[in-house]
Image: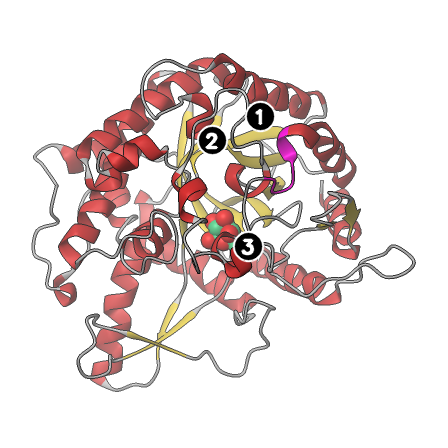
Amino acid sequence: MPSPFLWGVASSALQVEGALTEDGRTPSIWDDFHRRPGAVRDGHSPAEACDHYHRWAEDVELLGRLGVNAYRFSVSWPRVVPRGRGPVNKSGVAFYDRLVDALLERGIEPVPTLFHWDLPVELEEAGGWSARETAHAFAEYAAATADALGDRVRRWITLNEPVVHMAYGHAFGIHAPGRVLDVPDVLAVAHHQLLAHGLAARELRSRGLEALLTNNYSPVEPASDSPADRAAADAYDALHNRLFTDPVLFGAYPDLSAFGAGEVPGAREGDLELIAGSVDGLGVNYYNPSRIAAPAEGSGLPFDFAEVTGAPTTAFGWPVAPEGLERLLLLLGERYGDALPPLYVTENGCSQTDAVTPEGRVHDPERIAYLEGHVAAVDRARERGADVRGYFVWTLTDNFEWAEGYHQRFGLVYVDHTTQRRVPKDSFDWYRGLIAARR
Ligand code: FCB
């Protein structure tokens, strides 16, 4: 029997769990990075986040009320394998064990992500993603986690948005680990993440499990028809949309010559063969399209960002363009043809300036409009042949939004970050109704 379409929500460990020093968890790069002056807006800390580590049962209740049939969460590497490598931490595993069982009891498929940016600090100190060994450490951790949960979990996501982790964490320095590397070293970070995915996928598949890779995708449009803007748009497209997808689907890197890169540093013989064909599904995180212009004189990059005009924006300032999601899902089909596995929209959502009314309600009509528009875009893409098997809203509870701290509220559930009180927003009821009508 074919699996039903997955209607879900997504979250990640560092953004919701808190309990950073409990039950044997060791620090991740975000535990360190957020303490750097200016790294996170207003010095917000992930130490408590949504206290999901203690309130998981309440959160699973909320998922049950919402009616989702899938929940995408991430496993904290430093909780399960403290220090990144070596023995498995039984209490760390026990947390995910309980979570998985509670989800299954409610008919909710657990869809774990193995790496959502919380690298154990000790691995960072040994070179982080600049070191090839990190890929092997990841595969060991993936194997151990699959051994613990693989009897109940079928679909696994290896990495979340390696392109963002690479660029924000290792080129722009605005996410952990806050490094600002040169282009060749940034590409080595890309390669080691891809290798990590390939090695982990091999572990998962050898256990009869499915391996997915989730990336951030953004359909690219040149700021004008000029050859310079079009070349810049192609360069950005290669970096943002193709760098982590061509190797897994075509077994080759895209043309990176605009970045002055011939060979991708760190790639060894056999690596691309391992990486090629290593996905049973592609996770697509979509928030907004990009408009790209030729770089200003003296820029170190072959592109520049131009404003997407004529679209409303979210609280984050991101343009709202649901048709971009339809375009993207169809583009992936055109680009990769038979090599493209089933697609899952593993994140989509928006931050808004939500507030609780005196009656205890949270009215978020903009979020409802955003989600409605994007679900309709998925519907249209499917009608036109895109093989989309699931849609996950980012996110269940307002949480720690990386460098923005608690300033961006993306949740279907409002969280008072002082009391941890959860208040389902109007969008929660809207999504519940949609799922009930569709399932
Ligand atoms: C994505 C991240 C996710 C969340 C959303 C808003 O890039 O994967 O953790 O922060 O953006």
How far apart are the alpha carbons under marks 1 and 3?
43 Å
Q: In this figure, which residue is indicated by the disc labeled 1?
A: 1
* Residue 44 vs residue 376, the one in the foreground: 44
Tell whether 119 sits left or right of 392: left
Dot 3: what SS?
Answer: loop
Tell whether 320 sits left or right of 200: right
Q: In the rendered image, which quarter is residue 42 located in?
A: bottom right
Asked if residue 249 is positioned above or below residue 59 in the image, the reply reads below
Q: Is residue 52 magenta?
A: yes
Q: Residue at x 30, y 25 (%)?
A: 139
Front label number (1 vs 3): 3
Q: In this figure, which residue is indicated by the disc labeled 3?
A: 405
Q: Can you give x and y, in whole percent of width and height, for residue 394 in the image?
A: 59, 50
10 Å crowding of disc 1: few (<14), some (14-19), many (20+)? few
Dot 1: what SS?
Answer: loop
The stretch in magenta equals 48-53
Q: Can you give x and y, in whole percent of width and height, for residue 138 in the image?
A: 31, 28
Q: Can you give x and y, in whole percent of width and height, for residue 167 in the image?
A: 31, 56
Q: Residue at x 60, y 35 (%)?
A: 71
Q: Residue at x 27, y 43 (%)?
A: 249
What amino acid is at disc 1? Met
Q: Earlier in the sequence, mark 2 or mark 3?
A: 2
What amino acid is at disc 2? Ser
Name the disc covering residue 186, or none.
none
* Residue 393 vs residue 192, the one in the foreground: 192
Q: CB atoms at circles 2 and 1 under 8 Å apart?
A: no
Q: Residue at x 53, y 49 (%)?
A: 347
Asked if residue 404 is positioned above or below residue 148 in the image, the reply reads below
* Residue 302 vs residue 121, the one in the foreground: 121
Q: In this figure, which residue is indicated by the disc labeled 2?
A: 76
Query: In the rendered image, which quarter contains the C terminus?
Result: top right
Q: Earlier in the sequence, mark 2 or mark 1?
A: 1
